[in-house]
Image: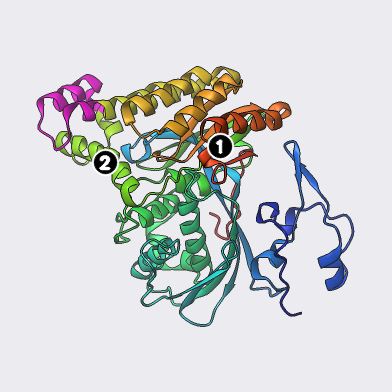
Amino acid sequence: YGVVRLRNFAPRAFTPLRSLPVTKPVNGLHDLLCRQIPRRKRLGYAKAQVPHRIILFGQLRFFKALKHMFIPGRIEFLGKHTDYCGGRSIVCAIDRGFHADTEPRNDKTLVLINRDTDETVTLDLSDPKTAPHHWSKYAVEVVKRVSDNFAEFQRGVTIAFHSDLPRASGLSSSSALMIMVFAAIAEVNDLHQTPSFKNNISDAFQLAEYLGCIENGQTFNDLKGSAGVGTFGGSQDHAAITLSRKNFLHRIAFSPLREEIRFDFPADMCFVVASSGVAAEKTGAALGLYNSLSMMVSAVTGTIAKSETLARIIENIGIENVRQQITEGTFEFPTQQLLDRIEQFYVENFHIIPKVSELLGEGKMNEVGELINLSQQNAERLLGNQIDETIFLQRSARELGAVAASAFGAGFGGSVYAVASVNDAGSFLRSWRETYLKHFPQHEKASEFFLTRPFQSDLPFVF
């Protein structure tokens, strides 16, 4: 059929073809390219729908080997820096993310075709290399780790992808990219059928934990660790991306990873997400700030009970004993910083999340706002990971009438969510954006505001 390029279509209009309400058959190439695709309302606004196979590969491919994946971003409703403490979070996936088509290769090469930047990256599976600060470094780490853990990883794959997630926005775009690469090479090489996989990963929860270990470099069961991407984080993002289901919020606990409960997200509400325009990259200076929050927890647990998580230590000896041991001990971090870090986790994990869970279980989303305000305030005062932009976005969202609002993710930039009624979401978004840009006009081009609801992934491996 030759090459077909549709550069006039905006990437934001992208939706997998299988989900479109096509009302009559497509007959021939001309009809496929020229017929007006039906339009579908999405929470108060409409977007043109474009066939994903054309956008991604830039040519018509109907091989049976060609498979589609959707790897979503995520919203951390509650649970700021709780996962690596062995605590809990309330999370969901969203309907934005990485849309990818994969095709097996007959060599040991990974080919990544980024349709957003018109880049093609080719990695030798035996010795993958890339530029230090290029987006493909996440793919390199996946290839290195999987090569070390699975001798059966011998076959390459081509991945053509597009993402409608704002980059470095706290929506887990980097984790989603890594999961995309892992899912593609795992499916092509049938890794789930190998002894190494079966002996170490028995369910979807363990898979999410392993994916987190690929990113942070830790060993998982008998699957030896590596350098990772340099973050000392947990598996919250990976759990939210792979385990979430459409229209639900999930309360997930860690160490070991498990789902405690899921809540119906109200049908008459949605998320309005504001990406501040300030990158929340887990690299460079932000990486050190992010890791220091994790290292403070490790310093405390390493002194009190090295083999236990912070959550388990608090459950075993009580928060007062933990505070006392910090006050009387000697650490590389200032005492007050450690006390603040522990206090933030204690309040978030043992008070705010249980109380919000109770309200969500009773269908009282309208009553969670003040508790989520407290979570935000503690992030500002105790974690110290908020910036002027995210603080303003959270405050202004509440002033404009949001049911609840909070910054989320690693912090030091990124995004804020607001919960609003579906009927008012469009006008709320416009007012929120206008208010923000009046105070921070320098972020007009980089910031992005959009509507979403809890969604789920479409991955080739399902337990």
Residue type at mark 2: give it.
Ser
**162 up-or-down from 455: above or below:** below
- Image quadrant where one finds the N terminus: bottom right
The residue labelled by disc 2 is 292
The location of residue 304, given as percent across then percent down, is 16, 33
Local crowd size for mark 2, using a 10 Å CA cut-off: few (<14), some (14–19), many (≥20) = some
C-alpha separation, residue under disc 1 versus residue under disc 2: 26 Å
Camera-side residue of 455 and 40: 40
Q: Is residue 334 left or right of residue 438?
A: left
- What is the number of the mark on residue 463? none
Dividing the picture into quadrants, the one containing residue 420 is top right
Give the tally of numbered discs. 2
The residue labelled by disc 1 is 274
Residue appearing at x 53%, y 54% in the figure: 463
**Residue 59 visible to an observer of this rendering:** yes
CB under 8 Å between callouts 1 and 2?
no
Q: Which residues are magenta?
A: 314-339
Local crowd size for mark 1, using a 10 Å CA cut-off: few (<14), some (14–19), many (≥20) = many
Residue type at mark 1: give it.
Ala
Labels 1, 2: front one: 1
**Residue 264 visible to an observer of this rendering:** no
Dividing the picture into quadrants, the one containing residue 341 is top left
Camera-side residue of 154 and 34: 34
**250 up-or-down from 364: above or below:** below
The location of residue 98, given as percent across then percent down, is 57, 56
Residue appearing at x 81%, y 67% in the figure: 33
